[in-house]
Amino acid sequence: MTASIDWIHSRLKFGARPGLTRIEYLLKRLGNPEKKLKMVHIAGTNGKGSTVAFLRQILMAYDLKVGTFTSPYIESFNERIAINGQFISNAELDQIVETIRQIVEEMDQNELLAGITEFEVLTAIGFYYFKNEAVDIAIIEVGLGGLLDSTNVITPLISVITTIGLDHQDILGDSIESIAFQKAGIIKKLRPVVIGQITDEAKSVIKEVADENQSHVIEMSLDYRFTPKAKQEISYYSPKITADFRLALSGSYQMDNAAVALATFEFIASELELLIDNQKIQSGLNNAYWPARMEKIGDFILDGAHNPHAIRRLVDEFKTDSRQVHILFSAIQTKDYQQMIRQLLSISNVDLSVTTFDYPNAIELTQIELTDEVRIIKDWHQYIAQPRTKEDLYLITGSLYFLSQVRAALLE
């Protein structure tokens, strides 16, 4: 790990502090790079990363230079800031951190500006890097919520809200409506918003915010739709595109994410004067890659279903599977992990093991409600080294921080 990454991590001590004052000041000192970029802003409880992956590859199929800002990381810290899938290099990161660090140290001497967080620093690094590299378009994933997230200083070409579910209730509120209001905070005046599979109560909140901003809502099932054609294939329908497409990413929920990406691309194509070309779109969908989302490594399937909303979609994938389904699960303490465990137990023929991992906020095994259906695993390294049966299915799920560690071990 480089000195620059160590310094960025040193800002973790300030935790998550919703608000835009600090990031706005830092970006102003950097010349407001975010105002010199064409951007797409993506929020949602789940599906953000996969939607980014689909959209990035479609735009790259048009030979565009595409920046992506995502979180958390699975393969490498640097992957959070990338251009055309190539992570920012340590040398490039060092150069930008040298500039930003001086400003941050000055800010720390000011009571109103002190304590800028790791995510705020990363946001500024991403915007500054994309401006310096003159990307054609940048796809920006919200970190937490939307309204007060540090990425919400941008005025994108289009906003996207993939899904709404209960997550981060301690910060975003304990109802679907309050969480929807936070996500809808990314909607900007006279800029459209694409929404995915969203419940009626969340949709009404989003539409109210959109109306206030005179923002056109591009709604799944109304303005665009899809039908599953086969495993990893969809028939997509909209005013500009009617075609069958194959998806590189596995999981039926990826059909939703691909459809959201396609609807977003349609608007971007009109803005950037790109001709709709189904072959280029298919090429992009073929090349979409997102680690730890129904990813097969050896005998294991890895899926970072890190909240109850995502676990529910994961359970739908396997609940009627006739095979024995062996699951290894872990999470962080801020999630409703007891509910997630109960959801996983609804899968037929399930063999559920719960573990912990090396992370400051990982669940403690003494907190798990012990039942005959749940096995406690103290060391997940031993679990993945055990002999496996070819006829059975082996799934590892839960926190993306956990999946990152397991994935690295499996790839070794």
Image: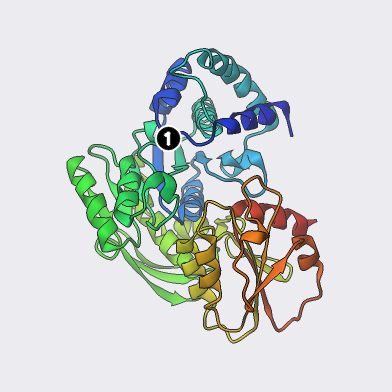
Q: Residues within 10 Å of mark 1 (few under 14, many from 20)?
A: some
Between 264 and 381, the residue placed more toward the observer is 381
Q: State the quadrant of the N terminus.
A: top right
Task: Estimate the x, y position of residue 287 in percent, counting from the top left.
Answer: 56, 57
Q: How many marks?
A: 1
Visible in this render: residue 275?
Answer: no
Identified at 51% across, 40% down, the residue is: 69
Identified at 45% across, 62% down, the residue is: 309
Between 234 and 109, the residue placed more toward the observer is 109
Q: Secondary structure at mark 1?
A: loop
Q: Give the residue at the far bottom of this rendering.
A: 322
- Which color scheme did the rendering employ for the protein? rainbow
Identified at 42% across, 35% down, the residue is: 18
Against 293, is 160 above or below?
above
- Give the left or right position of residue 68, taking residue 405 as reference: left
Visible in this render: residue 303?
Answer: yes
Provide the residue designation for mark 1: 18
Q: State the quadrant of the C terminus.
A: bottom right
Q: Amino acid at mark 1?
A: Pro
- Give the left or right position of residue 269, taking residue 67 as reference: left
Task: Estimate the x, y position of residue 2 in percent, counting from the top left.
Answer: 73, 30
Q: Quadrant of residue 288?
A: bottom right
Against 134, is 44 above or below?
below
Task: Estimate the x, y position of residue 406 in percent, counting from the top left.
Answer: 71, 57
Against 86, is 131 above or below?
above
Task: Estimate the x, y position of residue 333 in percent, counting from the top left.
Answer: 57, 53
